[in-house]
Image (cartoon, rainbow, N blue to C red):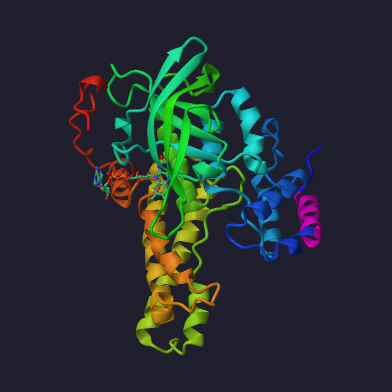
Amino acid sequence: MVIDVESFRQKARTWLAEHGPEYADFKQGDRRLAKKFRADLWDAGLLGITLDKAYGGQGLTDAHQKAFSEEASAYRLPPMGEAVTTGICAPTLLDFGSEDQKARHVPAMVRGDETWTQLLSEPNAGSDLAGLQTKAVRDGDEYVITGQKVWTSGAMESQFALCVARTDASLPKHQGLSMFIVALDLPGVTIRPLTQMTGDAHFNEVFLDEVRIPAENLVGGENNGWRALTAMLTHERLALGAGTGAGGSGASWAASASSQFIELARRKGLDTDPVVRQELVELYIAERVLRYMGQKMRDEISAGINVGSKGSVAKLATALLSKRSASLGMALVGPGSAAWDPADDNGSAYADTLTFSPMQAIAGGTSEIQKNTIGERVLGLPREPSVDRDIPFNQVMQN
Ligand SMILES: Cc1cc2nc3c(=O)[nH]c(=O)nc-3n(C[C@H](O)[C@H](O)[C@H](O)COP(=O)(O)OP(=O)(O)OC[C@H]3O[C@@H](n4cnc5c(N)ncnc54)[C@H](O)[C@@H]3O)c2cc1C
């Protein structure tokens, strides 16, 4: 029998009252506690609320999800998912994976037992992803993958990746690609961290040297990789811009700096400065608009409406907002934001936010590429010229 919404709300309330306070001191980046939280929530039947029962979810309605989210909003809790694993890879597997692939991986992804990454970008293929050169050659019951990937977020902490490789170079570039599940502990996989300007090493270069994977790891059929990839990028833009994902909770989406800045301006006596007030109001409005836009897209998806490339609008808006909000934070804090007291544990927070903020304008497709996508697929403007679109890939000049 299906649990009704009010009983489910009560169940969530009871669980949260007992376990919620345990996470009050959660610090961003505490992966151990974040994993424990998701596992506990899943085991209590409160995660994957709308996810199909066949994949370990509760198979309940959006109203159940909404009831849970309302109850959870009273607590400070770790995220309910990871942007890449549950926001991008799990929805892509749900769209294109075989029943075996979905049953094997999706529950583990949502519960937090498996962390995934995306092996897409290469030194010569970023915005022009269809030009990627990593190849996968069928050999009996296996594919052999060879190539180099780069900017792979979180590869060091991940167990699996969705990898796109070329299976037929005699076809035009979009047509000869395939998507695969690759376990990152296989022989031939080398992962090297890249230090970014924040000082962290969040992404990596990944070398694939004749990596042998079972043929059943093909996702969505041979030479169908561009379709799967396009769907994956749509999920990525929605996850980054509108907080969608298989965990069902808008995990990665948190554009809400303005309330913190208003408080900061008050403390610094800047809340009467007309220029600061104007900036704060504009930031607040932009956050609200983005929040409603994200909510609308999540509601449309729940209602089975294909939002298509509209995720690019939310992704572009998120990129603009995060840059603006990082700059305002620096301006409000003043010189201390760039030259902080070493004794202050939180001293680098504003500089970290500023140096991290350009990532929104690059990851998942740059802002220029989002503008192209919006122009072509949302506004119906003419396509950008492409000279190599219809030529067999092995006849296109490389590098
Ligand atoms: C934080 C972060 C995490 C990432 N994580 C991953 C990951 O996990 N997996 C992965 O595969 N990749 C990842 N990436 C890579 C990301 O997808 C690429 O960096 C991005 O697509 C741009 O590709 P590129 O760096 O090769 O730049 P290029 O494509 O070389 O672009 C260089 C510049 O040219 C502009 N440009 C290119 N083509 C056009 C065009 N047609 N019209 C107008 N302007 C254009 C771009 O906007 C950009 O300003 C990540 C990147 C970042 C910053």
Asked whether, in this view, residue 140 is left or right of residue 60, the answer is left
Please tell me which residue is depicted at 70% across the width and 35% down the height of the picture. 56
Q: Quadrant of ligand 1?
A: top left
Residue 250: image location, x then y, percent = 56, 52
Residue 8 included in the magenta stretch of the image: yes
Q: Nearer the viewer, residue 246 or 334?
A: 334
Q: Nearer the viewer, residue 246 or 339?
A: 339
Q: Is residue 121 above or below residue 32?
A: above
Residue 132: image location, x then y, percent = 32, 31
Q: Is residue 13 above or below residue 259?
A: above
Q: Does any portion of residue 392 appear in the rendered image?
A: no
Q: Is residue 246 above or below residue 138?
A: below
Residue 241: image location, x then y, percent = 45, 52
Task: Kindly report the secondary structure that dominates the magenta region of the rendered protein.
Answer: helix
Q: Is residue 88 above or below residue 93?
A: below
What span is colored magenta in the figure?
Answer: 5-18
